[in-house]
Amino acid sequence: MFSDFDFNVIWRALPYMLQEGLVFTLTLTALATAGGIVLGTLLALMRLSSLPFLPQIAAGYVNTMRSLPLVLVIFWFYFLVPYIGQWVLQSDRPIAVGAFASSLITFTLFEAAYFSEIMRAGIQSISRGQLMAGYALGLNYRQVMGSVILPQAFRNMAPVLLTQTIVLFQDTSLVYVLSIPDFLGAASKVAQRDGRLVEMYLFAAAGYFLISFTASTLVKRLQRRIAIIR
Amino acid sequence: MSAMITLNNVSKFYGPTFQVLKDCSLTVAKGEVVVVCGPSGSGKSTLIKCVNALEPFESGDITVNGISLKAPGTDLPKLRARVGMVFQHFELFPHLKITENLCLAQQKVLGRSRDEAMTKGEMLLERVGLSQHAHKFPGQLSGGQQQRVAIARALAMDPIAMLFDEPTSALDPEMINEVLDVMVELAREGMTMMVVTHEMGFARKVAHRVVFMDRGEVVEDAETTSFFTEAKSERAQLFLSKILSH
């Protein structure tokens, strides 16, 4: 199997792998993380709200997303979003949604469900006394959340949020089912074209491993640095 | 003297059957210091949290400086901003430096500029004797120091009254006095204060009146001297005999 292993295959494919594949994967990861944390935090606040219906809506959303396989959601959005867009905008034909936009929407919505559970745990880890102290000073709900509760919840949950981001980074490889040239998709394309499956898939594996491993090491270090002094 | 805080028949339930507060009525006049005491579980902390609407209550009403908490349209955040509160567990914001703890609400609620807020904060920190700790985080201070910062944080809002919810109960014994000293000074300056505490020495020294609570009821409400010398109710006598015997 390794008798004709050819590093030149990897070497030649490197610019394409990095400039197209890796850039796509990292951009998707970064944007979906940002969007997922924002949406996830809103879902967590809804879920913990004392207003009617909001907790049920948020819980329904989170439970639905967590009960579906990611690949299915990716397919579903890719093929159905154009038709939903057509229906919403009342246009004559399906709305063209690019592969990138489609996968970004999918991952944002999907990961928001996971980030919201993390943020919910983070918010609940802050004692009720902090909430009361904020209110006692005259802050309103938005100010108490924005200045007192959420900053502490983020600090407490940062390691878990980043770990989830690493999982997201690996999950983005599933967009290859849409024939999108992400890092894995790009490797796959070259592998098929040149008939060099061993080299390209090993290289892709090494790439994912290197980035994920480095990132989790950094998370561990960060964890020690940003802990709130108690 | 006109009333600053008035409670009229305040009742509160946990669930359909358990009543934590039963028809509690009391008045704190402007400039008056009232100590609320009683055995644990008697509802004192719940009562004081009701005063600035941190705990909801089912019936009765509370007015603070003439404003009713139950009246529709009462701006609760605005009212709370004018009533300082000090908690048993300090509740400083652990992710913010001492200066930020002091400035946060001044800037966000009162709309003061950064400079104004800092000047006020530094002045109050000086007053509680902690100027050299301005740039530390709460976790780097002792319990007594944290509680003094918490008092300074409440005072920074220029409150018309101060509520203290067992301010020394979570402190090591040697730190209790540094906090009480600040409170005594505040009382002598004429601040309106409602204090839930077991520190009977503090009550004797500065309180005008002592309110004794048991099982959710205001059992006794008397002038400080007469409370200690001739408590009328048996329950108050029993309580006093237990805590003053040592």
Image: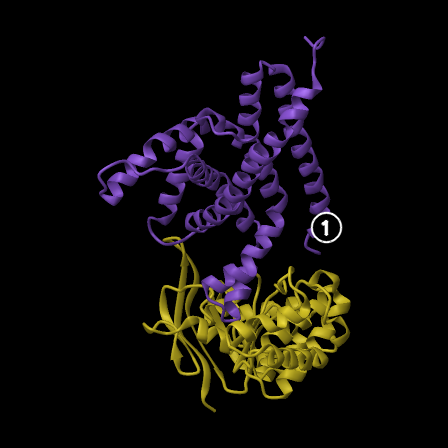
Q: Is residue A50 above or below residue B70?
A: above
Question: Split into 4 quadrants, where in the image is the N terminus of chain A?
Answer: top right
At label 1, which amino acid type do we have? Arg
**Is residue B42 among what the camera can see?**
no
Q: Position of residue A82 (x, y in %)?
A: 32, 36
Q: What residue sits 50% from the left and 39% below the top?
A: A114
Q: Give the tally of numbered discs.
A: 1
Is A90 left or right of A112, judged from the image as shown? left
Q: Is B198 in front, or is A112?
A: A112
Q: Residue at x 54, y 39 (%)?
A: A29
Chain for colour yellow: B
View extreme (bottom): residue: B1
Could you say which quadrant of the image residue A100 lies in? top left
* Residue position for label 1: A225
State the quadrant of the C terminus of chain A: bottom right
Residue A209: image x %, image y %?
66, 28
Residue A184 lies, in percent from the top left, at 56, 26
On screen, residue B23 versus residue B136, left or right, reads: left
Instruction: Give the chain of mark 1.
Output: A
Q: Which chain can be seen in purple?
A: A
* Image point (73%, 66%), residue name: B136
Quarter residue A213 falls in: top right
Q: Nearer the viewer, residue B131 or A219?
A: A219
Q: Position of residue A16 (x, y in %)?
A: 59, 30
The relative height of residue B130 versus residue A146 in the rendered view (above or below) is below
